[in-house]
Image (cartoon, rainbow, N blue to C red):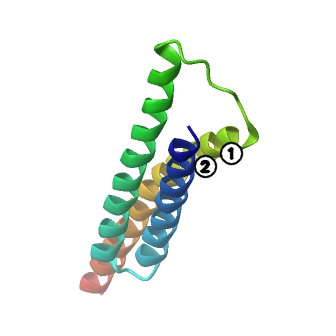
């Protein structure tokens, strides 16, 4: 179980970091980089979710899990990463809209 929880924490943290990097790239109008970082965040979330699912299946199979602070911490990382990734997708979209408006404004001039 400890290995699964560790992977949950590592991948959740990676996903959150990549989502934050996506927002920073979008702020600099580097939308290609922002999209790459969002994809990487999604990949890390997929891995974290896989480890979470393994833990759920262990319990469903009758293997009682001991709930510890580290498991709660892992779940916390995952949920925060999902929230930050979802917000990052919205923020990247907003930055793209602002850039498009600025471009259109410049063309009208």
Task: Classify mark 1: residues with Cα within 10 Å, few (<14), some (14-19) or many (20+).
Answer: some
Residue at 30% across, 68% down: 36
Label 2 Cα neighbours within 10 Å, binned few <14 / some 14-19 / many ≥20 = many
Residue 109, how many percent across, how many down? 30, 87
- Which residue is at the front of the view, 40 or 8? 8
Which residue lies at the image location 48% right of the left edge and 55% below the top edge? 11
Residue 13 x/y as whole percent: 55, 58
73 or 87: nearer the eye? Answer: 73
Asked if residue 50 is positioned above or below residue 26 in the image, the reply reads above
Q: Disc 2 on helix, strand or loop?
A: helix
Q: CA distance from mark 1 to mark 2?
A: 6 Å
Tell me whether circle 1 and circle 2 mark residues in contact (CB < 8 Å). Answer: yes
Position above or below: 54 against 98: above
Residue 77, which numbered label? 2
- Which of 101 and 46 lies nearest the eye of the viewer? 46
Q: Which mark is residue 100?
A: none
Q: Which residue is mark 1?
A: 73
The percent coordinates of residue 39 (x first, y second) are 31, 59
Is residue 105 rendered to the left or right of residue 95? left
- Name the side, left or right, on which 71 lies relative to 57: right
Residue at the far right in the pictured view: 69
Q: Residue at x 45, y 66 (%)?
A: 18
């Amino acid at each position: 179980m400890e290995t699964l929880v560790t992977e949950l924490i590592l991948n959740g943290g990676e996903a959150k970091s990549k989502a934050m990097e996506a927002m920073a790239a979008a702020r600099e109008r580097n939308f290609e980089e922002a999209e790459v970082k969002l994809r990487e965040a999604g990949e890390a979330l997929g891995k974290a979710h896989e480890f979470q699912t393994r833990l759920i299946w262990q319990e469903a199979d009758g293997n009682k899990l001991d709930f510890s602070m580290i498991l709660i911490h892992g779940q916390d990382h995952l949920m925060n990463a999902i929230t930050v990734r979802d917000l990052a997708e919205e923020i990247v979209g907003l930055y793209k809209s602002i850039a498009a408006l600025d471009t259109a404004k410049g063309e009208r001039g």
